[in-house]
Image (cartoon, helix red, strand yellow):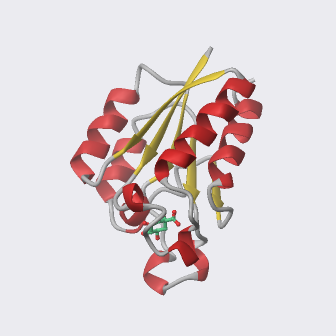
Amino acid sequence: MKKILILNGPNLNMLGKREPEIYGTHTLKDIEILCHNKSRELNFEIDFKQSNHEGQIIDLIQMSMDKYDALIINAAAFTHTSIAIHDALKLLDFPIIEVHLSNPKKREEFRHFSYIESIAETVISGEGANGYLLALEKLQKLLQ
Ligand code: DQA
């Protein structure tokens, strides 16, 4: 069974309360449940994690090296700032999918650049919580 790590960055633990007009009303727990349900359908095993701390996200990426077959990452604001996360992701030799609930390219200019997209297989943005499920479906095709 293929193992997938789903990693969420800062402030995503506040989903539901956080700017629902932008991010929707699902909590991160809701999204985790949706991902578990979809993974059962696709025969994936997933670990779903969140951290507000850049260093902890880097530790999780490093530890994922020999444990997983793919990574889905919503690095949240670190997407636009973190060369360190970019460098950590370059260690991985399995597919990476970048997910955003909103479409950062259609928002403030400071969100237009991503340090992750050059390494990611695909970027899925602007699809809300469904973006995570689309990422899992994409991985099913990629990992066949
Ligand atoms: C986000 C978009 C980022 O620009 C923002 O900083 C986030 C969430 C999204 O999922 O739409 O925290 O990654």
Please provide percent x and percent y for residue 141: 77, 33
- Of residues 67 and 33, the one drawn nearer to the viewer in this rendering: 33
- Of residues 28 and 7, the one drawn nearer to the viewer in this rendering: 28
Q: How many labels does the image show?
A: 0
Q: Residue at x 56, y 58 (%)?
A: 26
- Of residues 15 and 133, the one drawn nearer to the viewer in this rendering: 15
Q: Is 16 rendered above or below residue 112?
A: above
Please provide percent x and percent y for residue 104: 55, 73
Q: Which residue is drawn at 63% across and 61% down?
A: 128
Image position of 131 (left or right of 109)? right
Find the residue positioned furthest to the bottom.
Answer: 108
Quarter-of-image position of residue 137: top right
* Quarter in which the N terminus is drawn: top right
Q: Residue at x 24, y 52 (%)?
A: 53
Quarter-of-image position of residue 52: bottom left
Please provide percent x and percent y for residue 79: 42, 62
Please provide percent x and percent y for residue 120: 56, 49
* Quarter in which the C terminus is drawn: top right
Q: Residue at x 48, y 51 (%)?
A: 28
Image position of 45 (left or right of 17)? right
Image position of 1 (left or right of 62)? right
